[in-house]
Amino acid sequence: MNKTASQEWLVKAWHHLSTANILYGIEHYTDIIGVEIHYSIEITLKSLIMYENKALKKTHELYEIYTMVKELITLDEDEIKMLIQATEYHILEAYPASHRRLPSREEIKQILDFTNKLFEDVCILLNISIEEIKAN
């Protein structure tokens, strides 16, 4: 078990998650909030891989990452759908793309709430202080 490595990953996940929360609170663009949500989920799930000292696969597909850690944390069908939806928020291109949509505030709120809960659940599971994470 590598609690130190997973804690480092959770600090980075918190940076993305707290940014998403702030941006949502000031009614910023939902596509930008979605990017922050995606990275928070990705890094939170990867913190579990780091905790287990497993090899880290380079992927941004959230469901694929979840399959690597589902023996540690269980998500229900609706939560898995949110993982799949949040994967769409990840951007590969730096330029505008006509196929990208602006998620609704309701959609972003639902996935943001899920992400906050996932983050807290992982911290509790790994016995890592949320307050200590937030202080970094």
Image: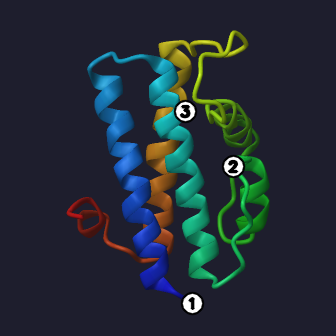
Give the CA distance from mark 1 to mark 3: 29 Å
**Sequence-first disc among 1 and 3:** 1
SS at mark 1 in the image: loop
- Which residue does the image show at 47% across and 15% down from the upper left? 105
Of badges 1 and 2, nearer the viewer stands 2
* Residue 37 screen position, x and y as percent: 50, 39
Circle 1 Cα neighbour tier, 10 Å, few/some/many (<14 / 14–19 / ≥20): few
Q: Mark 1 highlights which residue?
A: 1
- Which residue does the image show at 59% across and 52% down from the upper left? 42
Locate residue 66 relative to residue 125 in the image: left or right. right
- Which residue does the image show at 53% across and 28% down from the upper left? 110
Residue 111 numbered mark, or none: 3
Locate residue 119 relative to residue 65 in the image: left or right. left
* Residue 108 screen position, x and y as percent: 51, 24
Q: Amino acid at mark 3?
A: Ile
Q: Mark 2 highlights which residue?
A: 60
Observer able to see residue 77: yes
Above or below for 1 versus 85: below
Q: Amino acid at mark 2?
A: His
Q: How many marks?
A: 3
Residue 86 numbered mark, or none: none
**Sequence-first disc among 2 and 3:** 2
Above or below for 63 versus 104: below
Q: Quadrant of residue 70?
A: bottom right
